[in-house]
Image (cartoon, helix red, strand yellow):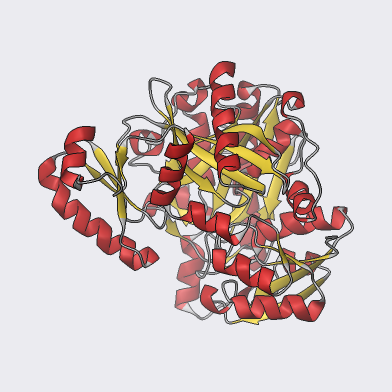
């Protein structure tokens, strides 16, 4: 099937990324937008765009009927879900298929098979993919309490039907178990409509390593190497890099082959990610499989030269995968930082408002995947990620220095962002040495406050921004308070430009 027009069922930077790939391939694009996104870059970039109305996700980007109707009305013959929203919704994948639209991703059956963590682990264990010791309910005659005694504390309770840390509890002793189970069930039911739980051995200092895979509809599968995603907060990734300093070539080969085995076991097609936990003894275990494009796919593209989104479209069009595993190589090192509208000093509370000034760092091997621009309104309706900053270097040291420089020259005024926090992480000695695990932020940044000094470029931009808006009189005390709360001057004590 030749794909001629794609409806991009998403917003922001990922919608822009997909549209770029489509347009470079000569494929027309259809954009959609909620009321608050009417002037967003992805709307302007699309060949044609259509409103979704009410900005609440359920009424807009999660409304399958509206999306399918727009696709049919515009003559689109394929739908790309991006990530988030409906990207791992098997019902949406099937609805697209039933409407005669090509869903650019795996089949509904495959999405279902990996969407349930318990079922996924059972499948992988039977296939011979290493799985963390645990309890999934299939162990005959064994209770959770008995499983804890078998595995040994601490253990991790997780919701079977979801992720993002919801329904996740660490239990250190038998006396804590019952209360933790009850709490986890309530959270899981509320978040995912499913209170089924699984139990795993808790790994003390694990690293989160994932492998990017591509698979066509004819059984051909390759991996595009690993990404280190250990720097997380609330089980959500903040900084990613490739390659990982934790892997030697032998371990990389073993994990890569396990990822390919996982994909072949379930008959996977399109782009996907097999995620592993790596313990202190360099033993790896299957965690889950993400049946979609990942936020951090850009760093893989930077080090392999392979356009993953274009390959998604080619595979969905029925093309054979022409990449050969033995010929795939990585060059250099790439790091990605996720730029969020949030306040790290206030427990990462999301920040809303209007971006008055946006100035992005430029230079060789610096990439921005962004869906924002000056004047963009940051609403409370969606994930607060504004953009992704990606850098490439000859090696990790070079890439780290480039990222620190790029963050120092990244200006986004009007909302509070996590840019100073990201700079602090990249500058930290433990990051520089590659001593990472999933507790990195909790260990080194549990109580963090921004420096009282900011880069001169930010101070100058702030002064210009304040001058530009000084002539605008706003009688609203609330508006004034909001503007002041996001001002960089609030972070600055005594300062001088020549220091």
Residue 339 position within the rendered picture, expressed as x and y whole percent measured from the top left: 57, 49
497 lies above or below 95: above
Residue 17 position within the rendered picture, expressed as x and y whole percent measured from the top left: 73, 54
Residue 417 position within the rendered picture, expressed as x and y whole percent measured from the top left: 52, 53
437 lies above or below 415: above
283 lies above or below 470: above
Residue drawn at point x = 61 percent, y = 68 percent: 94
Residue 439 in sight here: yes
**Looking at this rendering, what residue extends furthest in the front direction?**
140
Residue drawn at point x = 54 percent, y = 40 percent: 274
The quarter holding residue 498 reads top right
Residue drawn at point x = 14 percent, y = 39 percent: 173
Q: Nearer the viewer, residue 23 or 498?
A: 23
Task: Name the side, left or right, on which 289 lies relative to 106.
Answer: left
The quarter in which the C terminus is drawn is top right
Task: Name the side, left or right, on which 418 lies relative to 76.
Answer: left
The quarter holding residue 386 reads bottom right
The quarter in which the N terminus is drawn is bottom right
Residue drawn at point x = 72 percent, y = 35 percent: 302
Q: Nearer the viewer, residue 84 or 123?
A: 123
Task: Name the side, left or right, on which 441 lies relative to 227.
Answer: left
Q: Nearer the viewer, residue 222 or 467?
A: 222
The quarter holding residue 283 reads top left
Residue 25 position within the rendered picture, expressed as x and y whole percent measured from the top left: 87, 53
Residue 498 in sight here: no
Q: Nearer the viewer, residue 325 or 337?
A: 325
């Amino acid at each position: 099937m030749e794909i001629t027009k794609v409806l991009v069922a998403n917003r922001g930077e990922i919608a822009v990324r997909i549209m770029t790939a489509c347009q470079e391939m000569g494929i027309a694009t259809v954009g959609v937008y909620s009321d608050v996104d009417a002037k967003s870059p992805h709307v302007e970039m699309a060949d044609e765009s259509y409103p979704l109305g009410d900005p609440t996700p359920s009424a807009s980007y999660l409304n399958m009927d509206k999306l399918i109707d727009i696709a049919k009305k515009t003559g689109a013959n394929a739908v790309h879900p991006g990530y988030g929203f409906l990207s791992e919704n098997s019902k949406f994948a099937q609805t697209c298929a039933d409407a005669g639209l090509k869903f650019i991703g795996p089949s509904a059956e495959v999405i279902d098979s990996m969407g349930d963590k318990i079922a996924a682990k059972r499948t992988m264990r039977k296939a011979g993919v290493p799985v963390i010791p645990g309890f999934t309910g299939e162990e005959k005659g064994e209770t959770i309490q008995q499983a804890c005694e078998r595995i040994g504390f601490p253990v991790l309770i997780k919701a079977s039907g979801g992720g993002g840390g919801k329904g996740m509890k660490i239990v250190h002793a038998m006396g804590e178990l019952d209360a933790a189970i009850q709490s986890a069930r309530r959270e899981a039911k509320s978040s995912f409509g499913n209170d089924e739980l699984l139990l795993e051995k808790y790994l003390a200092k694990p690293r989160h390593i994932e492998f990017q895979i591509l698979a066509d509809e004819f059984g051909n599968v390759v991996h595009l190497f690993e990404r280190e995603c250990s720097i997380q907060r609330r089980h959500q990734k903040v900084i990613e890099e490739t390659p990982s300093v934790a892997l030697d070539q032998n371990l990389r080969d073993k994990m890569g082959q396990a990822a390919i085995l996982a994909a072949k076991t379930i008959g996977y097609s399109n782009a996907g990610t097999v995620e592993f936990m790596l313990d202190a003894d360099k033993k790896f275990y299957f965690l889950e499989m993400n049946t979609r494009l990942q936020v951090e796919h850009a760093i893989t593209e930077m080090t392999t030269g392979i356009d993953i989104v274009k390959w998604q479209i080619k595979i969905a069009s029925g093309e054979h995968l022409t990449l050969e595993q033995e010929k795939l190589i990585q060059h250099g090192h790439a790091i990605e930082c996720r730029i969020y509208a949030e306040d790290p000093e206030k427990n990462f509370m999301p920040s809303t408002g209007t971006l008055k000034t946006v100035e992005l760092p430029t230079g060789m091997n610096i990439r921005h995947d962004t869906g924002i621009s000056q004047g963009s309104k940051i609403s409370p309706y969606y994930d607060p990620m504004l953009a992704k900053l990606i850098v490439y270097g000859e090696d990790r040291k070079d890439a780290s220095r480039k990222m620190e420089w790029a963050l120092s020259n990244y200006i986004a005024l009007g909302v509070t962002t996590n840019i100073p926090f990201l700079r602090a992480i990249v500058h930290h000695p433990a990051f520089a040495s590659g001593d990472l695990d999933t507790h990195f932020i909790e260990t080194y940044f549990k109580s963090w406050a921004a420096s009282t000094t900011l880069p001169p470029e930010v101070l100058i931009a702030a002064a210009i921004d304040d001058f530009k808006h000084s002539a605008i009189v706003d009688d609203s005390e609330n508006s004034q308070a909001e503007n002041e709360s996001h001002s960089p001057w609030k972070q600055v004590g005594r300062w001088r430009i020549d220091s």
